[in-house]
Amino acid sequence: MSNVKGSLAGLAVLAGLLVAACVTPGPVGPGNGGDLPGTSWVLSSMPGANGAMMPVPSRPQVTLQFRDGGSLGGSGGCNLFGGSYRTDAGRINISQLFSTLRYCEEAGVSDRESTYFRLLGEVRMYRTEGNSLCFFDVAGTEVLIFTRAPPVSPLPLVGTPWVLNSLASGKDTVVSVIAGTGIDALFTENGSVSGSCGCNRYFASYTSAGSSLALGPVGSTKKFCGEPAGIMVQEQSFLALLSRAGGYKIEGDQLVLMDTEGNGLLWFGAGTGS
């Protein structure tokens, strides 16, 4: 029994350390939030059912990345999300949030993700202390605590088997790939890209320089698949978006194909290929 009590006491101390990373919001200063662009974070604590700050399970990981140019993104633990942010003297405004619409099967993940997305939109102040980033609402109440993620070297475009997670669907809308319809891409050194588009195989030539990307005409086989529902519509959408690709960016093990204006079209993660 004493060992059990000791373990519980240790967990309580650990929880206290996690939720006490920041106490009050403060203005931006050297080492205090002025370097958000280019940083990546993992959510460590958020309000529990009683409103008190509680540790967040380490799996599935909930993340946040600040990018140059005022955009951000990450994972809610199930779905990918994106948005915009502005900072000014310790204040932060996160807006234009969007996410993919994948169904989350694991118990509790969907509710935690919905709360996370809601709280991101309510954040008004922030503070960094060492490897911790803390968000506060308009009343100055701490609502989210993050731990700095270790740097991850970006994977190469060529030779990495990329698996599609989501695709653009109209203006400011992103949808997840239909379950069971694997779509992937493999860029080779000889200037070709090919893979599965869910039902058929596709192929094209490409050239790249820096972050620019240009594809030749995209061809595919012509098989018809009746299931699951929507697979052929999704396939045509993927091929049309792929044909519009004019650039790309890689963050760790995530690849985004963009149009010539920098708008995201297709979001991939590193996988095992088809």
Image: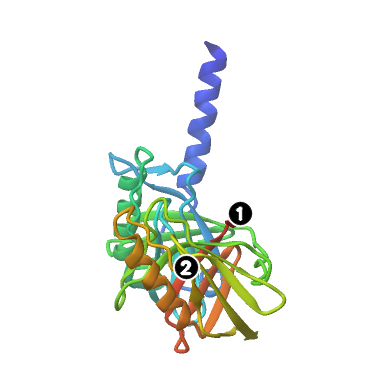
Report the residue marked by disc 2.
267
- On the image, which quarter does residue 158 sit in? bottom right
Residue type of the residue flagged with mark 2: Trp
Residue 219 percent location from the top left of the image = 50, 77
Residue 113 percent location from the top left of the image = 35, 51
Q: Which residue is drawn at 55% across and 85% down?
A: 216
- On the image, which quarter does residue 234 sit in? bottom left
Q: Does the CB distance between marks 1 and 2 fall below 8 Å?
A: no
Residue 122 percent location from the top left of the image = 29, 63
Please say if 138 is above or below 52: below
Residue type of the residue flagged with mark 1: Thr
Is residue 21 in sight in this rendering? Answer: yes
Left or right: where 155 falls relative to 237:
right
Q: How many marks?
A: 2
Residue 173 percent location from the top left of the image = 31, 71
The foreground one among 149 and 80 is: 80
Is residue 92 in sight in this rendering? Answer: no
The foreground one among 134 and 70 is: 70
Left or right: where 117 falls relative to 23:
left
Dot 2 crowding, Cα within 10 Å, few <14, some 14–19, many 20+: many
Report the residue marked by disc 1.
272
